[in-house]
Image (cartoon, coloured by chain):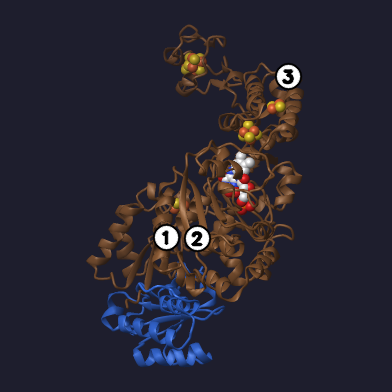
Amino acid sequence: MAKVKSLADLKKIKEELHAKMDLREKSNDPDAQVQIKVGMATCGIASGAKEVMEFLIEATAKRGINSIVTQTGCMGYCYAEPTIEVTMPGKEPVVFGDVDLKKADEVIEKYIKQGELVDGIIPVNYKTIDNN
Amino acid sequence: MEKYKMHILICGGTGCRASASEAIQNNLQDALKAKGLEEEVQVVMTGCFGFCEKGPIVKILPDNTFYIEVKPEDAEEIIEEHIIKGRKVMRLLYTDPEKKEVVSDSKHMGFYKKQIRIALRNCGFINPENINEYIATDGYAALGKCLTEMTPQAVIDEIKESGLRGRGGGGFPTGLKWEFASKNEADQKYVVCNADEGDPGAFMDRSILEGDPHSVLEAMAICGYTMGADKGLIYIRAEYPLAIERLKVAIKQAREYGLLGKDIMGSGFNFDVEMRYGAGAFVCGEETALIHSMEGLRGEPTVKPPFPAESGYNGKPTNVNNVETFANVPVIINKGAKWFKKIGTEKSTGTKVFALAGKINNVGLIEVPMGTTLREVIYEIGGGIKDGKKFKAVQTGGPSGGCLTEKHLDTPIDFDNLLAVGSMMGSGGMIVMDEDDCMVSVAKFYLDFTVEESCGKCTPCRVGNKRLYELLDKITEGKGTKEDLDLLRNLSTVIKDTSLCGLGQTSPNPVLSTIENFYDEYIAHVEEHKCPSGQCKALMQYVIDPELCVGCTLCARNCPVDCIAGDRKEAHIIDTAKCIKCGACMEKCKFNAISIQ
Ligand SMILES: Cc1cc2nc3c(=O)[nH]c(=O)nc-3n(C[C@H](O)[C@H](O)[C@H](O)COP(=O)(O)O)c2cc1C
Ligand code: SF4
Ligand code: SF4
Ligand code: SF4
Ligand code: FES
Ligand code: FES
């Protein structure tokens, strides 16, 4: 590893390393983040949820959105997989169905950034143990 | 570069390691590999989470899931269920003892709600053996800022302004101490970190060194910069092998990065740190004794002045600070004195780390803002008294402190308040006692400790404490008199007034505070020869209730000294003069006929 020869050096190293620690820092304050859960049960993975999850992680980071993207189990909407659940700080969770990469992009741009609703919302009629 | 979606943090503190955190880490990594997930999930071993009682702790991010009492065999289920299927492993979650509800994430645990973590900021958060994780969380930025943008005096002023006071027990203003050391001219000066931590039950400093060693190294370098010292020494007890190991790794990595050594960050400032090992004597935590011990002399205190800031290690100006004091420094520089001052009370700013122990539900390591009340600590963070028993006392300040009672529960904790009610902050031990604890025995316990640890230099401390112990022992044996209480008080005052160092000056505190706050209990011992909490063996008597006894003879057959008499089907009777109070009879009796009085 290179020596730290100046404060500028230190800052540069910190920037490079920051991405790695970002996830840990955010989880210190989950309530201030946009929380996105991706349904990753068998049916979800089969219908491309993994790609959607990776896209969400990268896209929110690139677009400067403070978010925590996690996977969750079967959400019970196999007919509409991949599904994602988005919780804006201080708001009720909203579930979107049939999320492909294009739809994911739309959710970020319209719902997360501007608060507009997007087609494909599934009425939430369940409570997981996490919604306490 | 790998981009991890989830992080699994495993506690690698001494408490949890003792119960197999390494095996857990290996099993988790194996399970991840088996599923091809090692690129997506990062497994990190961190420092103590503070919840050692329920260790080993495993925390999953980003959802903050907090698993307790994890065993190596649980690794596969955690990966399979939580990581892959996104379902929490319910049986490993923490259950709130009051509400009987499962709490799935640490943010909602009463234990963490009232805590503010400054000194412990990185404990249970970063891998202490990886300098990169420290740098990524602002590590060494404060040192960089001081060396590049601030004069030594500006750094001293910032620390003075923050109101930071020494966390080693004395509560002396840190900025002022640094200023003294900086004003004394010399060809060589030293920065010393006091990691002796000798109070029974204390493990605050150990946890900081194990969980975040770089924060102490960084602060020592900052201190060196302010006073013009290029050498740092960490005095640590040899019984802390893990902390020593992590410090060694940290020093090595900091040197490799050029953050210790010559010309740090191009500033021309040189600083390096070495370790010195102590044999674990309590008195060696006193700063003059500590310095003598490092010089290879006997670990005995000497008269101040001269203060170490004038003439310390090798007769050179030396600044001694506690581990926790140092751990606060980088944050103060990064966030500013104004930010720091907002936390805590006017005269005691910031936070304090406590090792919470005794008859309390959540035993562990906590950090709370100064000014938090004892009630909040005991009931909200500590989760109340174990087994629904009644609170009786809380001991703060270790062997130098006192026992506080119900009426002190709403006292906001800070240096001055605790002194005012006859105890002290000390280094942060906090032991909670319930109705079953005998306060005379508690005082005796601490005196036993000080008698062992007195260096013997001053007669009042060497002999006086021994006499205090003997008087207390006499009282617990049921042989004390009311005059003994006056004797205890007088002798305590003499010892306090005539001892050279803090050990002798404070050792009678546990006696004085228990006499003051639990006078009735002392009276019960000396006048009625009874121990109200039933702890003093000599004062208890096993008796058989003739109404309940059916004469089954079971007790008599189990008494090791054959002191139970009685015919079959007749009420039995214990010869209390011969009884050795082993309790075997009471355990055996199926009719609850035997009780302690
Ligand atoms: C008997 C005795 C034991 C002490 N033990 C410790 C100790 O274990 N750790 C510590 O930091 N300070 C201990 N001190 C206090 C030190 O003498 C000194 O005040 C302290 O290290 C200064 O650092 P601070 O200003 O950062 O608190 C002890 C003092 C006495 C009298
Ligand atoms: S007060 Fe006790 S420990 Fe301190 S110097 Fe005197 S004898 Fe030694
Ligand atoms: S065991 Fe209990 S019931 Fe039996 S003889 Fe002893 S005291 Fe009586
Ligand atoms: S307490 Fe032990 S010694 Fe005493 S009577 Fe019972 S069995 Fe015998
Ligand atoms: S050692 Fe693991 S929580 Fe303290
Ligand atoms: S103990 Fe030294 S003069 Fe009394």
Q: Do the residues labelled 1 and 2 touch (CB within 8 Å)?
A: yes
Mark 3: which amino acid?
Glu
Q: The chain drawn blue is chain what?
A: A
Kind of element beneath mark 3:
helix
On residue B527, the disc is: 3
Q: Which amino acid does label 1 sit on?
A: Ala
- Mark number, residue B554: none
Viewer-nearest of discs 2 and 3: 2
Q: Mark 1 points at which residue?
A: B250
Q: Do labels 1 and 2 share a chain?
A: yes
- For disc 1, the neighbor class at 10 Å (few under 14, some 14 to 19, many from 20) is many
Q: Mark 2 points at which residue?
A: B217
- For residue A111, above or below residue B384: below
Residue at x 42% of width, y 77% of height? A19
B141 or B274: nearer the viewer: B274
Q: Mark 3 lies on which chain?
A: B
State the hue of chain B: brown
Please rate how many residues cluster around mark 2, counting C-alpha atoms within 10 Å: few if below 14, some from 14 to 19, many from 20. many
